[in-house]
Image: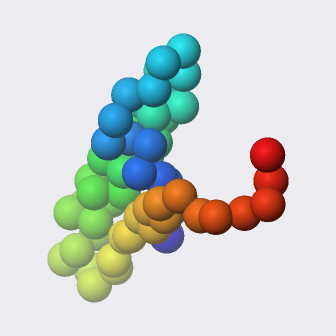
Amino acid sequence: MCLAEIAEASGLPKSSAYPASKAGLIMFTKCLAVEYAAEGIRANALCPGQILTYMK
């Protein structure tokens, strides 16, 4: 199980490394899923969206 985010779906100004790393993590998870599927091992990425918090 990998924890990624929906930030990989769109670029953000002045933060190219963050969405790129999340996109890489999602593709890594997809590759793991294909690589180990024959052995019955699953790989998933959890990609939460925005969450309302009181943080500023």
Asked if 40 appears above or below 31 in the picture, the reply is below
- The type of colouring in the image is rainbow
List x then y, in percent, for residue 53.
Answer: 72, 63
10 left or right of 21 in image: left
Residue shown at the point (80%, 53%) measured from the top left: 55
Say which quarter of the image contains residue 51. bottom right
Residue extending furthest right? 55
User: In the depicted view, which residue is nearer to us: 41 or 16?
Assistant: 16
Q: How many numbered marks have been drawn onto this rendered protein structure? A: 0
Asked if 22 appears above or below 51 in the picture, the reply is above
List x then y, in percent, for residue 18.
Answer: 53, 31
User: In the depicted view, which residue is nearer to us: 53 or 46?
Assistant: 53
Say which quarter of the image contains residue 34. bottom left
Residue shown at the point (34%, 79%) measured from the top left: 41
Residue extending furthest bottom? 40
List x then y, in percent, for residue 12.
Answer: 45, 26
User: In the depicted view, which residue is nearer to us: 15 or 27?
Assistant: 15
Residue shown at the point (19%, 77%) measured from the top left: 38
Asked if 23 appears above or below 50 in the picture, the reply is above
User: In the depicted view, which residue is nearer to us: 3 or 50?
Assistant: 50
| Residue 42 in sight | yes
26 left or right of 22 in image: left
